[in-house]
Amino acid sequence: MYQNSCDVLSSELIGHVLAHAFTGELDRDCLADTAAIPFGLQVTAPRFRDGWLLELAEGWGEKRPWPRVARGYDPFEVALGLT
């Protein structure tokens, strides 16, 4: 966890931009419980290429949208009793 935070901080200090994109979910067969664990991909772009990275992230998000609710969990509205 801390190693990833250091990587993000060092990338930002030298001017590289970062984006995170949904990649998939850990297979339920690998888990002890019934909840799926989503995971993503961190992409780093060269300095001053913010627009390129945003276009890449937008295109990725259109093809593989991040699920609103992880498999095995209730939406916040249901969990909080708001529906």
Image: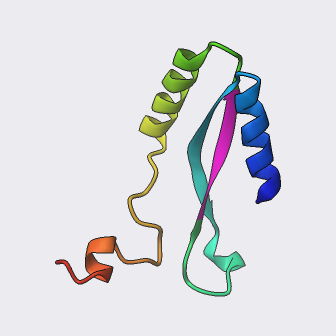
Give, as a single range, the part of the protein colored magenta.
Answer: 38-44
**Within the image, what quadrant is residue 19 found in?**
top right
Find the residue positioned furthest to the left. Answer: 83
Q: Within the image, what quadrant is residue 77 found in?
A: bottom left
User: What secondary structure characterizes most of the magenta part?
Assistant: strand
Q: Position of residue 76 (x, y in %)?
A: 33, 72
**Residue 42 falls within the magenta-colored stretch:** yes
Q: How many marks?
A: 0
Q: Name the image quarter holding the C terminus.
A: bottom left
- Quarter of the figure that contains the N terminus: bottom right
Q: Residue furthest bottom?
A: 32
Which residue is located at x 69 percent, y 15 percent? 47
Residue 33 is a magenta residue: no
Q: Residue furthest front?
A: 13
- Does residue 80 sit above or below 16 in this rendering? below
- In the rendered structure, the answer to whether residue 81 lies left or right of residue 33 reads left
- Above or below, 47 relative to 13: above
**Residue at x-position 56% and y-position 72%:** 36
- Residue shown at 70% from the left, 21% from the top: 15
How far across and how far down the image is residue 14, in percent?
77, 23
Q: Identify which residue is drawn at 49% across, 22% down.
A: 55
Q: Going by the image, does 38 lie left or right of 42?
A: left
Residue 5: image x %, image y %?
Answer: 74, 49
**Left-right relation of 50 to 10:** left
Figure check: 24 above or below 41: below
Residue most extreme to the right: 3
Q: For this rendering, which residue is in front, 14 or 72?
A: 14
